[in-house]
Amino acid sequence: MRKISVHRSGQAGGLPDEEDGRTRRSLDSQQRIVEALLALIEEGNLSPSAEKVSERAGVGLRTVFRHFKDMESLHRAASAAIAVRLQQVAREPFEAAEWKQQLHELIERRARVYEKLSPVLRAEQKYRAGSPILQAAHVNFVAELRRILVERLSASHRISGDMIEAIDLLLSFEAWQRLRVQQRLSILRAKAVLRNTIDAIVAGA
């Protein structure tokens, strides 16, 4: 009778283990490729070529396109990875108990995230126009940031709809980019402008 080998998983023949190994290697390669793209973008290359990505990831060019059919697919995966990072920040508990102070915490959080992810978010802006999937991801991104803001403002019944819209605008990436890039304000100065403006808006609330 032929002897049947049994591996640590308890499965006969070894096929499940081999398949699991291939799956892990495939996922590892995908992750390295996405991280390589994000690293290149964060270093200032907003449109890295597939060759640059494969070189940075330490994989062959064919491997890149075996996992991602084109560069847009790769950018979609990178966008999903960024969404996970943003969700992690969004779940951070607030230290302040009072809602006005929580708005200050939101300014600090968003400034930190926008500064860290600014190159990636600008690259996403570049590709978004031609990608319905990236457009949908951006809508979800904006909606999540707005949800967190509205939860903070719900503590006051004197906050009007116009106030919400104004504060939502002030805390957007577009507003931050305008202050930092076009108006050339330092991080500290940009945060102070947002804090003072938002404080003025909610002063009577």
Image (spheres, rainbow, N blue to C red):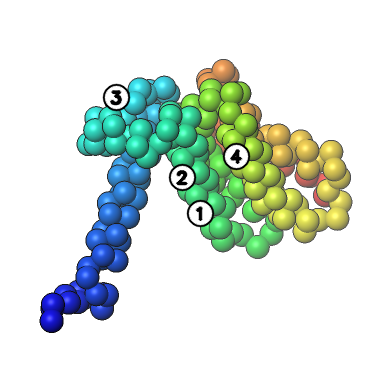
Q: CA distance from mark 3 to mark 2?
A: 21 Å
Residue 130 vs residue 98, the one in the foreground: 130
The residue wearing badge 2 is 81
Q: Which mark is residue 137?
A: 4
Vertical order, 18 against 39 (above or below): below
Identified at 54% across, 58% down, the residue is 92
Disc 2 crowd, CA 10 A, few/some/many (<14, 14-19, 20+): some
Residue lying at the far bottom of the rendered structure: 1
Element under disc 1: helix
What type is the residue that disc 3 sits on?
Glu
Where does the image place residue 193, in percent across and percent down from the top left? Answer: 63, 32
What type is the residue that disc 1 sits on?
Gln
Element under disc 4: helix
Camera-side mark, 3 or 4: 3
Between disc 1 and disc 4, whose residue precedes?
1
Q: CA distance from mark 1 to mark 3?
A: 31 Å
Answer whether labels 1 and 3 touch (C-beta < 8 Å).
Answer: no
Q: Which mark is residue 51?
A: 3
Q: CA distance from mark 1 to mark 2?
A: 11 Å
Q: CA distance from mark 1 to mark 4?
A: 16 Å
Where does the image place residue 119, in percent across and percent down from the top left? Answer: 45, 29
What type is the residue that disc 4 sits on?
Ala
Camera-side mark, 1 or 3: 3
The residue wearing badge 1 is 88
Answer whether labels 1 and 4 touch (C-beta < 8 Å).
Answer: no
